[in-house]
Amino acid sequence: MKKKFIAVIFIAVAACMCMCAFTLDMNSSVKSLTKPYITTYDCTYAHLGNQDLLEKYDYLKITFLDDEKIEVSFKKKKGKKHSYISNYSYDDESGELKAEIGILGFKFRQATKIENGKFNISMPILGKQLSMVFSS
């Protein structure tokens, strides 16, 4: 009986030591498991009408900062970086993303679905169709 008691205490102490050896990083895998869509998405395709926008920009990105805020950032070649932060909502069941962002005095609303780490944005702007594809 005494050997079993000592073995149980030894196992409990060993388990406590193992648990103390690990730390929980709130920016690591827990977030990716609970909100896997929260990451940075790079624009892989961007056209306004017949014009390829990627030829004029170093990058176009959308970054999910947390479960409420989104950042749209872009940098023109030979230009400054610009970024805008807005609120968004995401439906875990349908995968639908809804966001509204104000850029240069204009408000844009978009609803799209995130599927396989990608989503599309398509809307008319100044009489031309804007089509963009973002991928994580």
Image: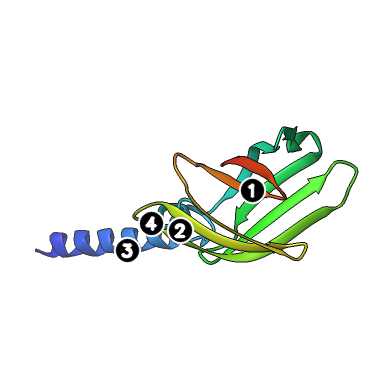
Q: Is residue 106 above or below residue 123?
A: below
Which residue is more in the foreground, 1 or 36? 36
The answer to whether mark 1 and mark 2 are in CB contact below 8 A is no
Alpha carbon of mark 4 to alpha carbon of mark 3: how far? 40 Å
Looking at this rendering, what residue extends furthest in the front direction? 127
Residue 51, image x, y percentages: 75, 34
- Crowding near the residue tagged with mark 4, few <14, some 14–19, many ≥20 C-alpha atoms within 10 Å: few
- Crowding near the residue tagged with mark 3, few <14, some 14–19, many ≥20 C-alpha atoms within 10 Å: few
Lower position in the chain sequence, tag 1 or tag 4: 4
Pointer 4 residue: 92
Which residue type does callout 2 highlight?
Ala
Which residue type does callout 4 highlight?
Asp
The answer to whether mark 1 and mark 4 are in CB contact below 8 A is no
Mark 2 element type: helix
Pointer 1 residue: 124
Lower position in the chain sequence, tag 4 or tag 2: 2
Residue 26, image x, y percentages: 51, 62
- Crowding near the residue tagged with mark 2, few <14, some 14–19, many ≥20 C-alpha atoms within 10 Å: few
Which residue type does callout 1 highlight?
Pro
Pointer 2 residue: 21
Alpha carbon of mark 3 to alpha carbon of mark 2: how far? 12 Å
Lower position in the chain sequence, tag 1 or tag 3: 3
Which residue is more in the foreground, 12 or 58? 58
Residue 52, image x, y percentages: 74, 33
Pointer 3 residue: 13
Q: Is residue 106 above or below residue 59?
A: below
- Which of discs 1 and 4 lies nearer the camera? The answer is 1
Choose top left, top right, bottom left or bottom right for residue 8.
bottom left
